Amino acid sequence: MDSLFYTQNRKTLYETLPDETLLCVYAGGALRKTADEDYAVYTDTNFLYLTGIEQAESVLFAVKENGETEESLFTLPPDMMKERWTGKRIKPDAATAISGIADIRSLDDLDDAVKAAAQRCRYIALDEDDMKNNNMTRVAFGVRMTVLAPRLEKYDIRPQLRRQRTVKAPCEIEAMKKAELLTTEGILAMMRASKPGMYEYQYKAEWDHALLWRGCKESAFPSIISAGENNFCIHYYGYNGQAQDGDMILNDVGAKYDHMHTDVSRGWPCNGKYSDRQRALYECALATSDHMFEILKPGLPMKFVDAEVHRYCGQLLCDIGLLDKPENEKKYMWHGGAHHVGFDTHDMVDATGDIKPGWVFCVDVGIYVEEWGIGFRLEDNCHITETGCECLSISTPRTIEDIEAVMN
Ligand SMILES: [Mn+2]
């Protein structure tokens, strides 16, 4: 992503801030895992959206006065001994090139800068994470800032960031399209290797290998890959099961590229040939998904997407004689039919109101029939355009014909 993208994201945010505001947005820090080992640092996606910088402990710092905003980025200072063990720290030139922020400073000077700005400001703008199980390093940062600037009134930038992140820029769509191609390669690798007797961890090995080989070092989210009965656990991460002849394989996976996530699910028979019941259910899901991609366009209420997935598929499940009434569809459809995707897999957005151009969300049709031992979902990524929508994950085989062709 070009630095202009991040510069524009900050500019839009700054315009919404009241005068006399000090803004501090934190990248996140390492959490202890065990002994002297830390968990990998996962950069806060709001910080990433505003800067593009992936360097633990960094802070975006800005002061708005008289309509003008002055911004700086505070990063870890050079430390030869620490860098020898844990890798190079980002240098000012590189930080500027990525983020478009000209003024790069040392984190050693952050506390003094916050205290000085607090003398001239009325508000302190922070990203107030509303998740219950918030990362403790972020909680500690928020506490530290309010201790340094106790007189300032808190101003939460999260509602504005939600609004901004709902509409994707063209460069975000381009990055997602590249990520989708990686996702396709990973799913194709699993389909090609598939055979009865294969273990779930072996399917996962195919997925991981396909991504790593292409330079995608991290999936967008923990991969869900399961076989047979394990498909009835919606967020299953066991990877221990073995596919028996006649079982369906379920994948719910995503690659990422340039910080953009994808989230794609397919269900296929491990032996490469859909049984009559598998075919009947898969065709209900596919027809529902096709219907959604035909009708989705700007102006429809977002809550319509989930309702229509359930209404339409419920009718089809009646038509094949599985359900008595369409409105009982929840017996077999266990989860919602849509969520936004972007810098996060379950993206941080404000999706109240009507669908707009630039929105990207999953269309997710899940069918789980325990009495038949068949469960799967068909999930694609929908980009809303000016007049309709496009399926970003169209390169991943989705018809029975195409999937069976790949597998045989
Ligand atoms: Mn998914």
Image: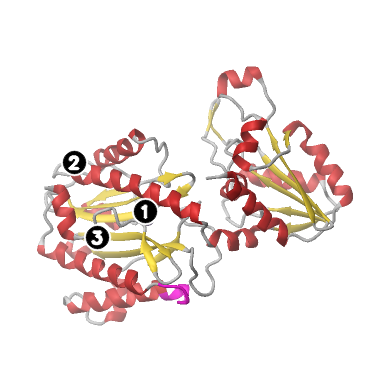
In the displayed structure, 82 sits above or below 188; it is: above
Whichever of labels 2 and 1 marks the residue nearer the N terminus, that label is: 2
Please name the residue that numbered disc 1 is placed on.
Answer: 235
Secondary structure beneath dot 1 equals: loop
Q: From mark 2 to mark 1, how far is it between C-alphas? A: 23 Å
Secondary structure beneath dot 3 equals: strand
Q: Are marks 1 and 3 in contact (CB under 8 Å)?
A: no
Which residues are drawn in magenta?
297-304
Report if residue 332 is visible in the image.
Answer: no
**Residue type at mark 1?**
His
Identity of the residue drawn at 54% across and 26% down: 35
Please name the residue that numbered disc 2 is placed on.
Answer: 193
For label 2, count other residues whose C-alpha is less than 10 Å away and answer few (under 14), some (14-19) or many (20+): few
Residue 104, x across and y down, in percent: 71, 36
Report if residue 238 is visible in the image.
Answer: yes
Please name the residue that numbered disc 3 is placed on.
Answer: 375
302 magenta-colored = yes
For label 1, count other residues whose C-alpha is less than 10 Å away and answer few (under 14), some (14-19) or many (20+): some
